[in-house]
Amino acid sequence: MANNKSAKKRILITKRNRLQNRFYKTSVRTLTKMFLSSLEAYKADKTPENKEAAQKLLNSVYSLIDKGAKRNVFHKNTAARKKSQLALSFKAA
């Protein structure tokens, strides 16, 4: 256990940051899986509704990745790579 005031503060800050990092990373992972399943549905049945649903999910994944990169959860190159791979998969469909 921490003995001085600054060490106690660092423990609290580390806990806060860990929870924030976990939120962004798991949310991006979950939304990416939802986007990919939506994309598979669009590939199976190419309707405008399916394409629009996939596009909306793609936009929300982009938003979350950008916010995570802004808060240093993801390195900027990692964020760019994730977005690029998602865009490529959407374009291929």
Image (cartoon, rainbow, N blue to C red):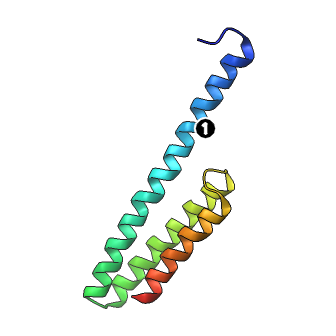
49 or 16: nearer the viewer: 16
36 relative to 20 in the view: left or right:
left
- Picture quarter with the N terminus: top right
Q: Is residue 86 above or below residue 30?
A: below
Q: Residue furthest top?
A: 3
Kindly identify the residue that appears in the image at 44 percent across and 81 percent down.
89
Kindly identify the residue that appears in the image at 50 percent across and 44 percent down.
22
Kindly identify the residue that appears in the image at 50 percent across and 67 percent down.
60
Kindly identify the residue that appears in the image at 41 percent across and 82 percent down.
52
Q: Is residue 89 above or below residue 69?
A: below
Percent x, y for residue 43? 30, 86
Percent x, y for residue 40? 30, 79
- Picture quarter with the C terminus: bottom left
Q: Secondary structure at mark 1?
A: helix
Q: Residue furthest right?
A: 6
Which amino acid does the dot numbered 1 rest on? Asn
Percent x, y for residue 24? 52, 51
The quadrant in which residue 64 appears is bottom right
Q: Is residue 7 above or below residue 40?
A: above
Which residue lies under the disc numbered 1? 17
Q: Which class describes the residues within 10 Å of circle 1: few (<14), some (14-19), or many (20+)?
A: some
28 relative to 36 in the view: left or right:
right
Figure label count = 1
76 or 32: nearer the viewer: 76
47 relative to 13 in the view: left or right:
left
